[in-house]
Each structure stands twice: as C-alpha cells, then as structure tokens.
Image (cartoon, helix red, strand yellow):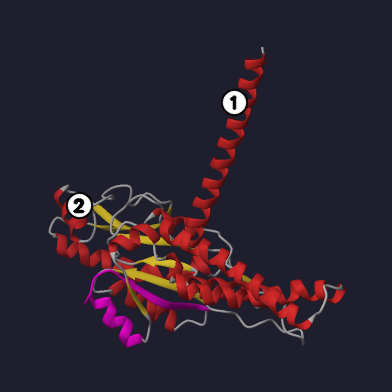
Amino acid sequence: MRFEGLRGIVEFVRSIFAVTIDYIMKSINKLQQKWGVGQVQFWLIMTTFALGGSLSGYLNKQILNLVFLEKNAAYWLIYPLLLTILWPFSVIFVSFLTGQFSFFKGYLGRMWGRLSGGNSNNGSANGSAAPASPMHVAIFASGAGSNAKKIIEYFENKSTSIKISLIVCNVPGAGVLDIAKSKGIPTLMINKAEFASTGYVESLHNADIHFIVLAGFLWKVPEVLVNAYQPGMKIDSSVVNGKVNTARGIINIHPALLPNYGGKGMYGSHVHEAVVAAGEKETGITIHWVDAHYDEGDIILQKKCSIDATDTPASVAQKIHVLEHEYFAPTIEKILVQ
C-alpha cells in the first residue's frame, strides 16, 4: 500500500511536469511565430532580455547607493522608476553584443509607440479628426513586375492612405527591382533558407508592413510568415480613413480559376499551357488569401475570360494580364479601405 501511494504521487508529479513542459514549449513556439525568428535567434533574444535586465538592476543599485546612504522610503520610491529608465538602454547595449540590435530596435520602437499613444484615434485637441497614417503594403515579386507596376501606379494616383512601401524579391536582377528603383521604393532581397526559417517577419515588422501582396512571387510562403500576417489581426499603428484598420493578411493572384490548375509548379506559362492543352473553353484569375499550402487559401475574387479555338498559351497569357491589371489593385483597395 505504501508503494502504491508513492507510485501515485510520482505519477501525479510526472503529469504536472509534463503539462508544464508542454505549456512552456507551446508558449515558446507562439513567441517564435509572433517574432518570426528561428530557435537560435529566439534564445539569443531571451538571453538579451535576461542580461539586459540583470545589467539594469546592477546599474540601478550602484546609482542609488551613491545617492542614498540608507535604504529609506525615497530609495524604494525611486528604485522602480530608475529601473524602468535604465532597462531599455541596458537591453540595447546587450543587443549589440548578442547581435540582436535590429530586433530590439524594432521591439522597443513598437513598445514606445504603444506607450506614447501614437496609435490612438481620438482626434486632435480642437476636435478635428487625426490625420490618417499610411497602410504600408509590401509587394513580393520574382519577375518583370508588370502587376507590381500597375499596383504602384494605381495607388500613386489615389487619395487613400495605402502606400506601397517595400518590394521584396528573391531573384537578383529581376525587372521588378528596376521598377522599385524608378519609383523610389525600398527593396529587400531574400534568400531561400532564411525565408523558410524566419519568413523575414522581423524585417517586415521593422518596416511597419501591414499587408503583403504576392504578385508573381514563385516561392511557397512559410508558415511562420502566414501566422504573423493572419487576416483580421489588429494593426494598431494603421489608421485608414479615420479608423483603425484590422485587415492584415497576405493575398495572391493566380492565373487560373482555382481550384483548377493550381498547386506546386503551376505558375505563369505552365498554367496557360495546361489550360490550352486540356481544351478549356474559359480561364481567368483568382485572387485569394494565402495559407501554408499552394493556392489553397480562401477565394476573394474570380474573373473569367473565354478561350477561342485559335488561342495559344501566349495569347491566353495576354488575356490574363488584362484581367490582372484591371482587378488586382482595386481588390487590394477594397480589402484595406472598408
């Protein structure tokens, strides 16, 4: 009986330990996804937090010991205030040593924005509405960038607060980079290994990107990026037409009527060749939300065009381009300004 009771206690402790470890691991995974970092960088960030906190605590005590001869009421009143002031400077200092300065620059910047109330929508002191902050959009593209160019030009000529703020490209020398240069838009070149592991979420957050548009981007979007840009996630710093906008997300345009002719390897001319070879009488475009799978996200809009007996993959491509240029930018606007 004594051993049975002991065994029960051991099993109970083991189950509590397992639940605790599971909770900790899930919390770590959530933070990694939120920050868009891999496992190594995550632990470097946590180390920076720990060392920064220790350094701020040490400096706090040293300064107060120089000012106060004894730990009186004033000492304990000033202690948390001075610690709060020292902490961000200590963390930034340590971040240089751990190689995480870029992360903490963005992290502390967003924290200061929330504390300073810069994202509120309460209007000015005289009762007029606060000026709208831009909704920053990033376009991901791999090729010539005809769709990217149309989207950029569309919003250049609109009075909405939508701004194409970044071009992300995975192909050195791609035409879309020339378009970005001519329009004065910053670019971000990415490599496949880092994109798969981090999704460049930190870089996108530091650039204050609220919404992502895939316009001829040929890599699969990693789950870490999808999770960081879920549709409907609140963007406190984004105010469009006088109200906080919550339409965060990633959208793509596909040159066929999904779910047909979608999936891995089905892009550009490959799609048009398959459609013509199958003897289809119509094709079209699909604008859809992006999830962790190829071309499986919820459909936002589809538009069709006919295929004539004399059509070739090249002529079908021209018809598709017409639809893309006509509907893609207005659909983005409809999602973001509503």
Q: How many marks?
A: 2
Would you name the residue on which mark 1 appears? 11
Q: Which residues are magenta?
A: 161-183
Classed neighbour count for the residue bearing mark 2: other residues with Cα under 10 Å, few (<14), some (14–19), many (≥20): many
Q: Amino acid at mark 2?
A: Val
Q: Quadrant of the N terminus?
A: top right
Secondary structure, mark 2, is helix
Residue lying at 18% horizontally and 60% vertically, measured from the top left: 269
Residue 283, label in figure: none
Residue 275 — which label?
A: 2
Please, is residue 149 above or below residue 250 in the view? Answer: below
Kind of element beneath mark 1: helix
Quadrant for residue 200, please give it.
Answer: bottom left
Q: Left or right of 321: which side holds 88?
A: right
Looking at the rendered structure, the kind of residue marked 1 is Glu
- Compare residues 33 and 22 and report the one nearer the observer: 22
